Image: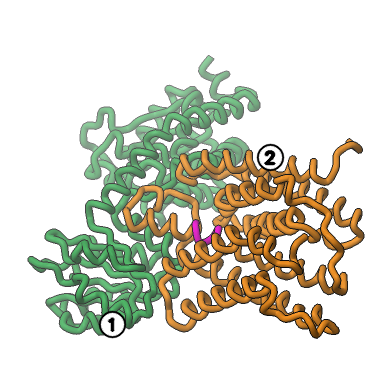
Amino acid sequence: MPLIVIGLSHHTSPVTVRERFAFPDATIPAALEKLRQTRIVTEAVILSTCNRVEIYAATDLAERQAMLALRQFLLDHHNYREPIQDEIYFHGEAESLEHLLKVACGLDSMVVGETEIFGQLKKAYETALQHKQTGRHLNKAFQKAFNVAKQIRTETNIQRGSVSVGSVAVELARKIFSSLDQHQVMILGAGETSEKTARALLSRGARSIIVSNRSHDRAVALARELDGRAVHFEDWAAEFPGIDIVISSTAAPHYILDRARLEPLMKLRRNRSLLLIDIAVPRDIDPAVNFLENVYLYNIDDLQAIADDSLRQRQEEIARCTALIRQKAGSLMAAEPLSGMNQASA
Amino acid sequence: MLWLTDRHYFLLAVMVYGLSTVYSLFLWRKGFRLHDRANYFLFLAGFGLQMKAMLMRGLAHSQCPVNNLYEAIAFVDATIVGTCLVIGLWPRLRYIGAFAAPVVFAIGVFALMPGLDTPGAKPQFNLDLVSLHAALTLLSYGAFGLSSVAAVMYLTQEHDLKFHKLRAVFSLMPPMDRLEKIINRTLWAGFILLTTGLAFIPLLLKGRPEARLTDDPKVVWSGLVWALYLALLIMHGRFHQSGRRFAWGAVGTFAFVLLTFWGVNLLSPAHRF
């Protein structure tokens, strides 16, 4: 299968270089057409994300010749004149399919096992397909990559667990509540992490957000951004009967919620489960509230420990996934008679 | 295979449940993270063998096989396993079998005790009504057994979440509120079945004015079990009792049923098989 890859990624280049080579979505069809017209490639897919810019191509040229021509195309297209050394990498036929499979499975991602890249790769392929820039070789390679990615996702633990504080909070909420669309979230203290956590919960379907902050203006601004509602800091306890998830990150030097205060509020909530995420340092919520029935309290260290463990488990799965990918790539290469490029390089 | 009796088939079923129990320990050690259905298929095999045993016994008696303590316990066992097989079809509820396996294995071993499978005197009642009464009440115990299994799952999850165990996040167990719903629904199902089963008692005693309900310890015991489950359902539904206490209530009441079922049958003249 005459498939080659050229590009830059977070492994080889800093963001200052990567951003210079990025292809905005709207320009990709034109870039593909321009690439085709150079006659370097017969088929091509351009993948451009914040962590990588890659061109997957099928070519009739010899590997070395194709690599130099594609490298020059990238530099010329982006008008990049500064000196460049190892930032751009190239994979010939032997490694290109394995690389594509690794990218599709998230094994080459900054956060190992992340799933966003799968969607980005699919979109890149569909753009090329839509503009008739793919053919037999790339179609087969990408279909295989998508199938293998799905298989790896179900057969291994590479994508299991959460690796950020926000996603751990979502994961915990989903262990308590079967669906988040019936549940309301409250943010106490409009910090950056609590905002990210709230966004993660909203993206998973949380019903609505209530924001309360000592500076009411900041609460109103954040509530507007999150399509929620702001309440004065003195009034947050009055909202408790309707709240199921609390994210607290105020700058208070003492506990703002302790057992004596929460106990009567739980009665008002008719003992419904309550998830408390305390990401403030010093802590906002007295650890003793965790002894109340139906109350689940997690602080920043608890969340980080879960995220770290997920990452460790994903790292442990890499070897297993790599072996599986090698086997799949090998079987595909064996099934497909070597052609074009190899004959040319011989 | 013609030499195999119904008890042999039941013994094989219990052995399969034993295997499932061992496999459940392995799943528990792995933190309930594995995407596999081995336990489900073990339950399916055990259920098939048990159905074969019950069918053979039923055909031999030409009636529902609930005529002695062995048959009654086997019937409860089959109800729990059958319901687990239905519920286990939902991917997030696949581990219900892992929690049920030790219970059904223990019940099965108990049922196999030789003294329990003795041909008793024919009841002095309408046989069809007796079959219906026994089947409904035993089905209700199956439902209560299942609710206690779901309650153990709930308590495990609750403990893991409270004490920040990593297993709480990484396991493939269902969310807490879904487990609470399962406990509630299976308890309601059991309660309705038990109420219907007990409602046959006056019909069974029709034409026997000398028989008094309070004379039979099993009837009194059944009334107590009925009241306990009613109290549990009212406390949860009406007074918003916490999920944890509700789960402990389901486990405790079923443990009471299991531990006293045999003894109370021995004391009951009408239920002494």
**Chain identifier matching the green colour in the rendered picture:** A
Q: Chain of mark 1?
A: A
Q: Does any portion of residue A134 appear in the rendered image?
A: no
Residue at (28%, 47%) from the top-left corner? A305
Q: Amino acid at mark 2?
A: Met
Residue at (19%, 66%) from the top-left corner? A285
Q: Amino acid at mark 1?
A: Glu
Q: Nearer the viewer, residue A78 or A216?
A: A216
Question: How far apart, in angstroms, are the residues tagged by discs 2 and 1?
Answer: 55 Å
**Which residues make up the magenta segment?**
B148-152
- Look at the picture and state if A245 lies above or below A158: below
Residue at (22%, 52%) from the top-left corner? A301
Q: Give the mark toward the camera: 2 or 1.
A: 2
In which quarter of the view is residue A60 placed? top right
Q: Position of residue B63 (x, y in %)?
A: 88, 62
Check if residue B51 falls in the magenta segment: no
**Chain identifier matching the orange colour in the rendered picture:** B
Q: Position of residue A99 (x, y in %)?
A: 45, 33
Q: Which residue is mark 2?
A: B15
Residue projecting furthest to the top: A346
Q: Does any portion of residue A121 appear in the rendered image?
A: yes
Task: Tell me, for residue A239, which label it has, or none.
Answer: 1
Labelled pair 2, 1 in contact (Cβ < 8 Å)? no
